[in-house]
Image (tube, rainbow, N blue to C red):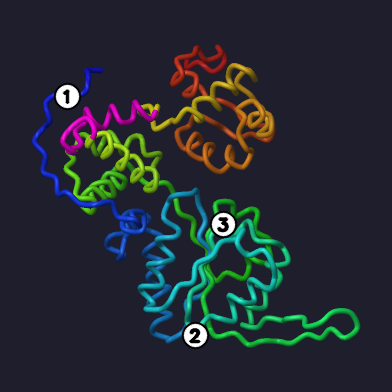
């Protein structure tokens, strides 16, 4: 690869100060700006339009899928479409039943309550949600011992939107109380390129099509990652150029981040290398991989495995994780004879 250009390229850049809420700025503000997930959006729009015609709150919605695919953005767009307020919290933030009771009793009619990381809700919290979602009531225990009594509080009509990366960790009774469940899938290369061009326009960046394609290939089919790479390429362009992001600048920015052309980061490659070199290609359990890589099991399963499986580098079997022939070839290793193509 050639060295970074010494002569700055001609830029078409609008200077602007960094937005303190940059991630919020890049979020879509309308359904037209929400790129991808077309089938999901089509079904969701029918749900919202029907609710508006009946003048009812939207049914409770469960959004699932890997991190960074736009679940939070979708919840905000639903609130905007329904012209109502959205209250945002997360599973780990609701530690006690009183915390949830306080949130629910402060809702106004037709509000949307968005709970991120819903799979991390305490089981006691889930049980309080059952009657809140089903009959719009909550039971609060006042006092202790023989003098304790229960009072029932009526709640205004509201919509719960829960987002999770691990829908299997939600209890069956909680999942059954959602009126509809949507799963967000990984984006296409074309979708990611469109998102990058939109983000570059918002940030006032000059970028050529080849640079967009270079960043999109490394974005793990995920909008959040694409925007992160764009911002890092912007930093590199401002330090080593005049702010314009060319293909050469994008390539060097990715190289500096140690991200390869398939979007694999150092930990992705380490996981594959450990499976192949330490455990003979697998099958091997998640716990053993996490220990060998000095990484948390949840991070292995939630952050790295979905993308490796999407690329076809990793397979989950009943006996454990197995590296595929593609993984061997990507790392420049010779696959076992039984895996080689005829």
Residue in the image at 31% along x and 45% along y: 192
Q: Main structural element of the magenta stretch: helix, strand or loop?
A: helix
Q: Residue furthest left?
A: 10
What residue sits right under mark 3 in the picture? 117
In what element is the residue under mark 3?
A: loop
- Marks 1 and 3, how far apart in space? 44 Å
As displayed, is residue 44 above or below residue 340? Answer: below
Q: CA distance from mark 2 to mark 1?
A: 58 Å
**Image: magenta residue range:** 239-257
Give the answer, above or below, for where 337 lies relative to 222. above
Q: Is residue 61 visible?
A: no
Viewer-closest of 180 and 305: 305
The residue at the point 44 percent across, 49 percent down is 68
Quadrant hosting residue 280: top right
Residue beneath disc 2: 109
Residue at numbered disc 1 = 5
Residue 33 in the image: x percent, y percent?
A: 28, 60
- The answer to whether the residue labelled 1 contacts the one labelled 3, judged by CB atoms less than 8 Å apart, is no
Where residue 145 sits in the image (x, y, percent)?
89, 79
Q: Nearer the viewer, residue 119 or 327?
A: 119
């Amino acid at each position: 690869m050639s060295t970074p250009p010494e002569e700055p390229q001609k830029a078409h850049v609008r200077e602007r100060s960094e937005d303190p809420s940059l991630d919020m700025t890049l979020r879509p503000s309308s359904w037209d700006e929400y790129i991808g997930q077309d089938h999901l959006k089509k079904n969701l729009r029918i749900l919202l339009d029907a609710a508006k015609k009946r003048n009812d709150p939207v049914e409770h919605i469960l959004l699932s899928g890997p991190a960074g695919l736009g679940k939070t953005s979708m919840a905000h767009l639903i609130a905007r479409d329904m012209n109502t307020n959205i209250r945002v919290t997360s599973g780990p933030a609701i530690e006690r039943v009183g915390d949830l009771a306080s949130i629910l009793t402060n809702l106004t009619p037709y509000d949307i309550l968005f709970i991120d990381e819903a799979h991390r809700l305490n089981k006691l919290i889930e049980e309080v949600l059952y009657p809140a979602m089903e009959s719009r009531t909550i039971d609060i225990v006042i006092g202790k011992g023989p003098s304790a009594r229960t009072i029932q509080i009526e709640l205004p009509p509201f919509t719960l939107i829960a987002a999770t990366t691990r829908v299997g960790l939600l209890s069956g009774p909680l999942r059954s109380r959602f009126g509809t469940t949507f799963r967000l899938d990984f984006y296409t290369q074309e979708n990611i390129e469109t998102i990058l061009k939109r983000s570059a326009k918002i940030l006032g960046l000059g970028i050529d099509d080849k640079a967009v394609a270079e960043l999109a290939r490394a974005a793990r089919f995920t909008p959040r990652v694409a925007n992160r790479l764009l911002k890092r390429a912007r930093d590199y362009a401002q330090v080593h150029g005049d702010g314009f992001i060319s293909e050469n600048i994008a390539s060097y920015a990715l190289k500096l981040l140690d991200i390869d052309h398939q979007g694999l980061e150092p930990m992705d490659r380490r996981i594959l290398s450990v499976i192949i070199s330490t455990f003979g290609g697998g099958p091997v359990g998640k716990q053993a991989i996490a220990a060998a890589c000095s990484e948390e099991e949840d991070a292995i399963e939630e952050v790295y495995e979905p993308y490796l499986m999407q690329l076809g580098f990793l397979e989950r079997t009943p006996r454990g994780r197995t590296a595929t022939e593609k993984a061997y070839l990507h790392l420049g290793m010779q696959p076992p004879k039984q895996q080689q193509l005829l």
